Image: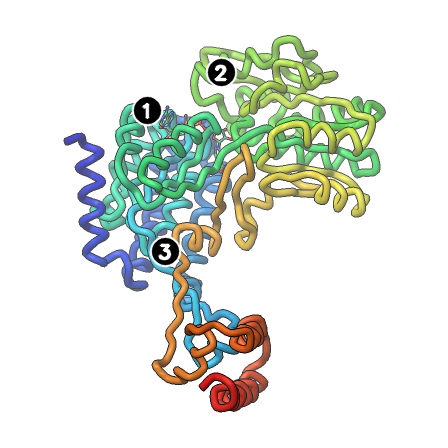
Amino acid sequence: MSREQLVVERVRKAFQTGRSRPLEHRVLQLTGLLRFVSERRTEITEAAKRDLGKSEHGTELFETLGLEGEIKLAVEKLAEWAAPRPVEKNLLTISDEVYVQPEPLGVVLIIGAWNYPWAVTLQPLVAAIAAGNAAVIKPSEISSHSARVMEELLSQYLDEDLYPVVTGGVSETQELLKQRFDHIFYTGSSTVGKLVMEAAARHLTPVTLELGGKSPCYIDKDCDITVACRRITWGKFVNCGQTCIAPDYILCEPCIQNMVLEEIKKSIKEFYTDNPKTFEDYGRIVNQRHFKRVMALMEGSTVAVGGDADESQCYIAPTVLKDVTGDSNVMQEEIFGPLLPIITVTGVDEAIRFINEREKPLVVYVFSHNNKLIKRVIAETSSGALLANDCLVHFTVSALPFGGVGNSGMGCYHSRHGFDRLSHLRSCLIKQLKMEGINSMRYPPHTAKKLGWARFFLLKQVNVGRLRRMALLAAAVGLAAFVVQRFLR
Ligand code: NAD
């Protein structure tokens, strides 16, 4: 029996004890996770520094702050999220209990990616715990320092049998994927996402796939280009461009290309100084394989800003490429690095066409003063999210579901969306063993008259306040008694 198989068996046994279900246990685990984040801040930031050259404050801002917010929100709202959810009734169920009861799915496999190793691995865990599940946590082997800290320390803060960390590379992940889970929550590339879904299909396991892709950014000429470029520069070069929702490329009219270039250049200098290589808030490419991949993407394009690199340090300067076309190397895959190509288009019509000719992205960004133009881009494109006049920050709005569509993923999470994603929303109907007479309309022999009454009772939606509902109930009971007496006996 493999190590992975043994772990999953142990977790399933722990889940079957039922101890992950009570809300008190969930809150205890969530507060344990919160304690882990605050007490182990040093270990977390050191690991992120070693993996990706992240600065201490950068790690807190982009990795753990959101995580802490998610945990606190889940603790505060858990009772509300987990409570039965009454639903609208029809005339036939007016005196019944009709509600949706969220229940845990069981054992969830969480497979994390390396770019924000803490946020993308532990935020799904918050949802899994809140929803009352057990979970096997598989951090990415590429961010190996973060994975090691997670493996060594998390068990001191969580119920180890319910939430173990399994480390390892592709073969360990593949071994895990052979096991039966009740949900697989995967964050990473679309290529591996397909393998995950294939493996899940063998057990009919549902999946959430948080993938990536090329998120376009259209800059309208009716726009504050200085502010737009500052926000784009921030969104693109944070974490050295290794952000799933980073703007991948810019679309704009030729008449503003030079101004866009100049403004981005100014912002790069403002944020990262003249020498980003020695500036602590500018990160590194995660490893040499990705360094080589990103460098190769630059081939064939004109470097307008930056372009210098140092392989020994996996350093690539913030770089802007101009006069790029849809056929350029850099447009053939998600960049996931600090290259920002500019493609010129004749206007919003061509920008929309360009976007729609490609896979559905995780985000569409649009910068404009013109609200009508923004609404048009919303109406005529499709993506996981749309953000106008800023970058990345939709991620921080916990009420918004976070996830992709089509090639950028399926399913979503954050706050209640994550809770619902990792719950089974069970339909519950509790009827009384009374009023049998009214059921005659569904029992044979079927007649046109009974069908007419069935239409009346089933198709009338009752969508009213409590008082009207009670009045209707009385009327419905009277009507039912009349129908039974007069027609159905
Ligand atoms: P990665 O290489 O770390 O892979 C992710 C996970 O998949 C790891 O845990 C790894 O062990 C596992 N894995 C890799 N190859 C596998 C295989 N052949 N079989 C089974 N498991 C395998 O990360 P990555 O794929 O390079 O991540 C980058 C991608 O993730 C980008 O496309 C990025 O946009 C996307 N991403 C998306 C989000 C999101 O929330 N939507 C967040 C972060 C990253």
Asked whether the beta carbons under mark 1 and mark 2 sit within 8 Å of each other, the answer is no
Position in image of residue 35 (x %, y %): 33, 51
Front-lying residue, 187 or 439:
439
Of all residues, the one furthest to the left in this rendering is 1
Give the vertical position of 430 relative to 271 (above or below).
Answer: below
Label of residue 170 in the image: 1
Examine the image and state in which quarter residue 41 appears.
Answer: top left
From the viewer's perspective, is 47 left or right of 312? Answer: left
Position in image of residue 202 (x %, y %): 32, 35
Kind of residue indicated by mark 3: Ala
> Is label 2 in a helix, a strand or a loop?
helix
Which residue is found at the position 44% from the left and 22% from the top? 286
Label of residue 63 in the image: none
Q: Nearer the viewer, mark 2 or mark 3?
A: 3
> Is label 1 in a helix, a strand or a loop?
helix
Of all residues, the one furthest to the top in this rendering is 300
Which residue is found at the position 72% from the left and 44% from the top? 379
From the viewer's perspective, is 97 left or right of 227? Answer: left
Neighbor class of circle 1 (other Cα within 10 Å; few <14, some 14-19, many 20+) is: few
Question: Which residue has dot 2 on it?
Answer: 291
From the viewer's perspective, is 116 left or right of 106? Answer: right
Kind of residue indicated by mark 2: Phe
Q: Earlier in the sequence, mark 2 or mark 3?
A: 3
Disc 1 CB within 8 Å of nearest ligand 1 atom:
yes
Q: Earlier in the sequence, mark 1 or mark 2?
A: 1
Front-lying residue, 268 or 84:
84
